[in-house]
């Protein structure tokens, strides 16, 4: 036990020294935290933009649907008027 202790202590000191060199500095950690925060902010902005675009697309689809319904109603009225005019002209020509 006495022979392994100095070797174990020396290996521990060398390992800690290596870990200190490998550990990122405070500036690097702050930059990484800021970059992570910026990435999260960008993701939130992209999601909000896509949600707004989806809402606009749904609104536009509803508006186009209403326009098509109005156009269909106007076409029906136009054809009814054309048929009434054709019948009136046919009745006037025969008399």
Image (cartoon, rainbow, N blue to C red):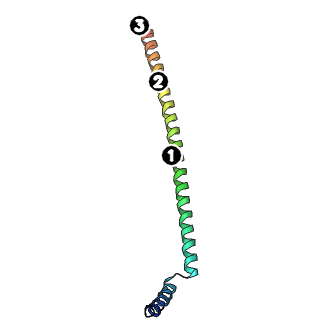
Say if 59 sits above or below 82 in the image.
Answer: below
Residue 81 location, x and y as percent?
Answer: 48, 20
Q: Which residue is drawn at 53% across and 56% down?
A: 47
Could you tell me how far apart the alpha carbons at marks 3 and 1 are, in whole angstroms? 55 Å
Which residue does the numbered mark 1 point to in the structure image?
A: 57
What's the residue at 54%, 42% (across, down)?
59
Q: Mark 3 points at which residue?
A: 94
The image quadrant of residue 92 is top left
Is 1 located above or below residue 40 in the figure? below
Q: Please name whichever residue, 61 or 8, is drawn nearer the observer in this view of the structure.
A: 8
In the foreground, 76 or 84: 76
Question: Which type of secondary structure does the marked residue at label 1 adopt?
Answer: helix
Q: N-terminal of the two: label 3 or label 1?
A: 1
- Residue 76 got which mark? 2
Q: Which of marks 1 and 2 precedes in the sequence?
A: 1
Q: Which residue is drawn at 52% across and 86% down?
A: 20
Point out the frontmost of discs 3 and 1. 1
For marks 3 and 2, give the CA distance: 27 Å
Q: How far apart are marks 2 and 1 (CA)?
A: 28 Å
Instruction: Looking at the image, tell me whether mark 3 or mark 2 is earlier in sequence order.
Output: 2
- Quick one: label 2, few (<14), some, or many (20+) residues within 10 Å? few
């Amino acid at each position: 036990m006495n022979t392994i202790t100095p070797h174990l202590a020396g290996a521990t000191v060398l390992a800690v020294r290596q870990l200190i060199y490998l550990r990122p500095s405070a500036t690097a950690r702050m930059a990484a935290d800021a970059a992570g925060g910026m990435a999260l902010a960008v993701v939130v902005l992209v999601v909000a933009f896509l949600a707004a675009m989806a809402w606009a697309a749904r609104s536009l689809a509803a508006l186009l649907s209403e326009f098509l319904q109005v156009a269909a109603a106007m076409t029906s009225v136009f054809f009814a008027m054309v048929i009434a005019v054709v019948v009136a002209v046919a009745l006037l020509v025969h008399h």
